[in-house]
Amino acid sequence: MSNSGSRGVPAPPGETRFDPKVLRAFGEVARLRFGLARMERNPVGLARRLSLALTGAQVGSEEASTFIRTLRDAPDSSPRVQAAADAITNRETWFFRDHAQLERVVAMAGEGCARRGEQGLRVLSAGCATGEEPLSVAMLALDAPHLFLGGAVEVTGFDVSPGALDQARGGAFRVSDLRRAEAGPTGWEGRFFRQEDGRLLARGWLTGRIKFELHNLLGDPARFEAGGYDLVLCRNVLIYFDQESATRALSALCGWVRPGGQLVLGTAEAGLLTDPRMIRTPVAGAFLREEAR
């Protein structure tokens, strides 16, 4: 790594310039650990993320090569791995994103529960970022309790970024974030949240139904119950993965869906799924797992 010279990747004023070999090594670790395969296409952005990871781990830029080597084998609980995850993950999300898809798959989940005579709903949201998706699903389900025969609504969201999960668990958002929100249940902003000092605060009876956990989608799938969820969502996450990582992730995702349950991907990711157990539904990006015969 070099802080000067013409061969390093150009850096904005005040930012560190890294040797291209160091950046390539960081990009490779990001691919192997987190599945993120497109970062090397933007060397300036990759350098900025490496700087953020070093700062978060309280490591000097002169130790960048050593830092990157430790990321290869350190456990997910390692502060250095968590600092890297915070720096490189994309937290772009908003309430009721792709609302037509989301509303329909929640309704379909309710129809499936009713058909099987089962109460309640179990949802798993993979790559949940700051929590808007799990909260949106919970609001849609709670707004239609008749669909789930009055049973409990349980939502689990997981992400690899501890910083994103801290915000998700706090249930606090900026009121200005509402500008990006898409259509949800009538009056949801006032029914499920309260406003205070420019913040949107989720009510306790909503957040109490949602758990947020730190987990890498490429980690051990046994972390969550096999065949234990009526609805598994992983939308707009796999678009950042290489083919090998996407295949591994999809194997885990399909394994978490209960027979008769749904897996929901982003519409641009639907073509990646080849598992013969999963049947396309009329909703773009949504698949039904075959029930046992």
Image (tube, rainbow, N blue to C red):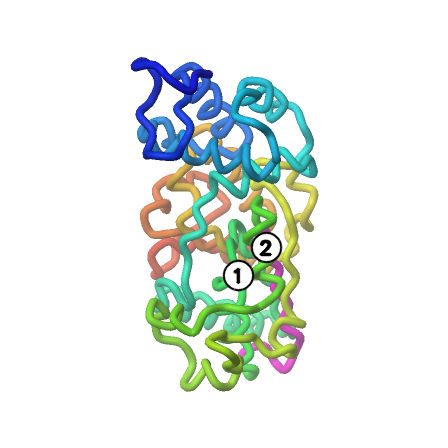
Q: Residue at x 48, y 24 (%)?
A: 26
Position above or below: 145 against 232: below
Q: Nearer the viewer, residue 98 or 62?
A: 62
Task: Tell me which segment is drawn in magenta.
Answer: 147-158
In reply to whether residue 156 is colored magenta, the answer given is yes
Check residue 131 in the rendering and tell me which mark sits there, or answer none: 1
What amino acid is found at the position of numbered circle 2 in the picture? Leu
Badge 1 marks a residue whose secondary structure is loop
Q: Is residue 133 above or below residue 159?
A: below
Q: Which residue is mark 2?
A: 165
- Image spot of residue 92 (x, y percent): 40, 53
Discs 1, 2 touching: Cβ within 8 Å = yes
Q: Is residue 104 visible?
A: no
Q: Amino acid type of disc 1? A: Gly
Instruction: Verify whether residue 45 appears in magenta.
Output: no
Cα gap from disc 1 to disc 2, whole angstroms: 7 Å
Report the residue at 59% width, 18% height from top.
66
Q: Is residue 30 left or right of residue 40?
A: right
Residue 105, quarter of picture = bottom left
Q: Nearer the viewer, residue 256 or 201?
A: 201
Q: Position of residue 186 (x, y in %)?
A: 41, 85
Left/right placement of residue 78 relative to residue 146 reads right
